[in-house]
Amino acid sequence: MTSALPIGVIGVGALGRHHARHLAASPEAMLVGVYDTDRARAREVAAACGSRAFDDLDELLGLVRAVTVAVPTPCHAEVGLRVLGRGIPMLMEKPLAATVPEADELIAGAARQGVQLQVGHIERFNQALRAAEPLLHHPLYLESQRLSLFQPRGTDVAVVLDLMIHDLDLILHLTGGAEAIDVRASGVAVLSPHLDMVNARVEFQGGVVANVTASRMARDRVRRLRIFQANGYLSLDLATGRGDFMRLRDGWRPGVAQELSDIVEFIPLDAPEADALSLELHSFIHAVRGDREAVITGEEGRAALALALRVTDAVTTTPLSQLAGK
C-alpha cells in the first residue's frame, strides 16, 4: 500500500481552507500543516483540520513533499519561487501568476528542479465537462457566461483574472491550445478599482470563435458553457455539473422534419459524480508520485494567463457616468 503524501497548504483564505479540509480527509495525503500570514486564521483552519499551523514557512517546507498554494495573485511568483527553490512540487491556484514573465519564472523554476508544477484550473474537473469530453468533435463556436455576486475576495485583480480565466482555460483546452489571432473586448469597473464586468470575442487560428462574459456584479450565480460543432450542440451547466447534447439524427433531410425531435436527439450528459476539488488534489498527488502527468501544466496555466491579459488589454472601458447618462 502506498504511504500518504506529506503535504502542506500555503494560504488558507477562501480557497486554501478548502484545500486543507480536503487534504486532511484524504487517505492519500498527510496534511503536515498550514501557513498563512494571518496567524489567527491559520490556527483556526489547522484546528478544524486536526493539523498544525506554522508561523515559519521554511519550517513547514522542511517537512513536506508537496504543497498547494492559495495566496493572493500578486504574491504567486514570490511564494511559488520560494517553494520551487526548495525542490518541492507545487499546485498553484489560478492564475499561475500576475504577469507572463512571472509565470515563465515559475515554469523555469520547476524545470530546473525537475518537479511538478500544476495549476488550479478546477473547472477541468467539472462533472459536466467530464461528461461532455467524449462527445466533442471539432468545436466551431463557444459561448460562456460566468456571473457572480460581488464579494471583496478577488478584487485585487480584474474580473478577467478572477473569474473569466476559468473559461479561457477551458476554451483553450477544448480547442487544443489553438492560437488566438484576434481579441476584442469591452468592460467596466464599478464596484472595485479593477474591471468588474467584461465581454470578449476571441477568434482562434482555424476559425473557431469564442464569446466570453464574466461579471462579479450579478444578482444570480451563472456558470454556463455552450459548444457548437458540426454534428450538434452541447449545453453545460457548470454550476450543477449537468448538461445536454443535442445531436443531429443520422439521415435527416432538410424540409421533411415536422418537429425538432425529428432532427435532433437529446442526450443527457452523464459522468460519475465527484467533488471537483477532490479530483484536482487527487490528480496532483498522483502527479507528484509520478503515476501520471500533471492535468494542467505550468505551460497551460501560462497560456490561459497570457490570453486573459490580452483580453484585459483589449478592453475599452466606459466610465459609469457615461453609462448612467445613456
Image (spheres, grey):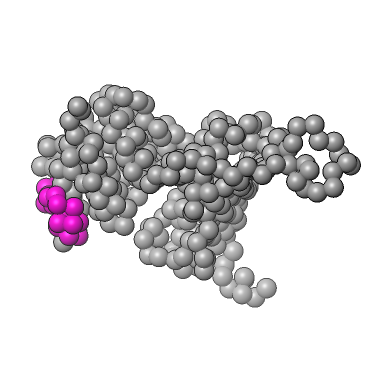
What span is colored magenta in the figure? 41-57
In the rendering, at what x and y percent does residue 197 appear? 53, 60
Residue situated furthest right in the rendering = 255
Q: Quadrant of residue 254?
A: top right
Q: Quadrant of residue 305?
A: top left
Quadrant containing the C terminus is bottom right
Is the residue 178 above or below the residue 266 in the image?
A: above
Q: Nearer the viewer, residue 284 or 271?
A: 271
Residue pictured at 44% horizontal, 34% vertical: 300
Residue situated furthest bottom in the rendering = 325
Residue pictured at 28% horizontal, 34% vertical: 285
Residue pictured at 80% horizontal, 49% vertical: 259
Residue pictured at 59% horizontal, 64% vertical: 318
In the rendering, at what x and y percent does residue 78 appear? 27, 43
Q: Is residue 52 visible?
A: yes
Q: Nearer the viewer, residue 111 or 7?
A: 7
